[in-house]
Image (spheres, rainbow, N blue to C red):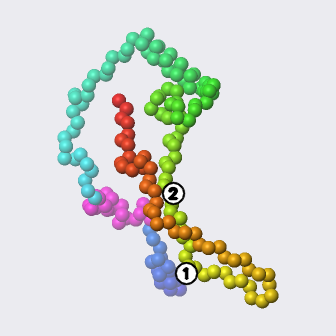
Amino acid sequence: MPQVLTLAMLPALAGCTIPKAVNPVEIYRTVTGAVDEGRPPPPGLDRGRPNLASVPPRPERPPPEVRDAISAALVANREQSRAALAPRAVPARPGQAAPGDPAIPASPPARASLAGAPAIPWSDTAPRARPPQGGGPAAAPEPAPPAIPDLAPAPPPPDLLGPPPRPELRP
């Protein structure tokens, strides 16, 4: 009976997987280095070891007065950054430069003016609504289609013709 039970358990054990940490085959491959066979070598193996004599000496510390001045300036900058910004007394007018840097405009550029689109004429092939048949109220007469102009549309304004202006380079 125990032999039959052992034979019945073998197919169940065959379906189990062994974790890599306790698998003897994986442990052997890790110890012998067979796991790393297909990997490229790490960069820098072809170079020699670094020369520690080429490291520059440590720079000398500045005097305490200079360090205290730098610390005081950093404290003042931190306190200044925590203060609320003062609102502008007079709002900038459109087209007027913002205070501080004259290269930054106070408002966005004006909208580009575009040429008007030509009028679309009425077509005679479009279906028209028919008046109701019967004794209903009389239908109003249809308006005549507008006259089609023979002239071409006006050209665009000169500020839209030609290449765009070159950007200003700041020194």
Q: Crowding near pointer 1: few (<14 within 10 Å), some, many (20+)?
A: few
Residue found 36% across the figure and 61% down from its top: 27
Q: Where is 95 relative to 67, above or below?
A: below
Q: Nearer the viewer, residue 38 or 139?
A: 139
- The segment highlighted magenta reads 19-38
Quadrant for the C terminus, please: top left
The x, y position of residue 36, in whole percent, is 29, 59
The x, y position of residue 120, in whole percent, is 53, 68
From where the camera sits, is residue 84 visible? no
The x, y position of residue 56, in whole percent, is 26, 25
The residue that mark 2 highlights is 116
Q: Which mark is residue 38?
A: none
Residue 49 is covered by the magenta coloring? no
Q: Where is 84 relative to 62, above or below?
A: below
Residue 35 is covered by the magenta coloring? yes
Residue type indicated by callout 1:
Thr
Q: Nearer the viewer, residue 154 or 158?
A: 154
Residue type indicated by callout 2:
Gly
Q: Which mark is residue 125?
A: 1
Q: CA distance from mark 1 to mark 2?
A: 26 Å
Q: Where is 97 relative to 77, above or below?
A: below
Q: Where is 31 relative to 133, above or below?
A: above
From where the camera sits, is residue 102 visible? yes
SS type, badge 1: loop
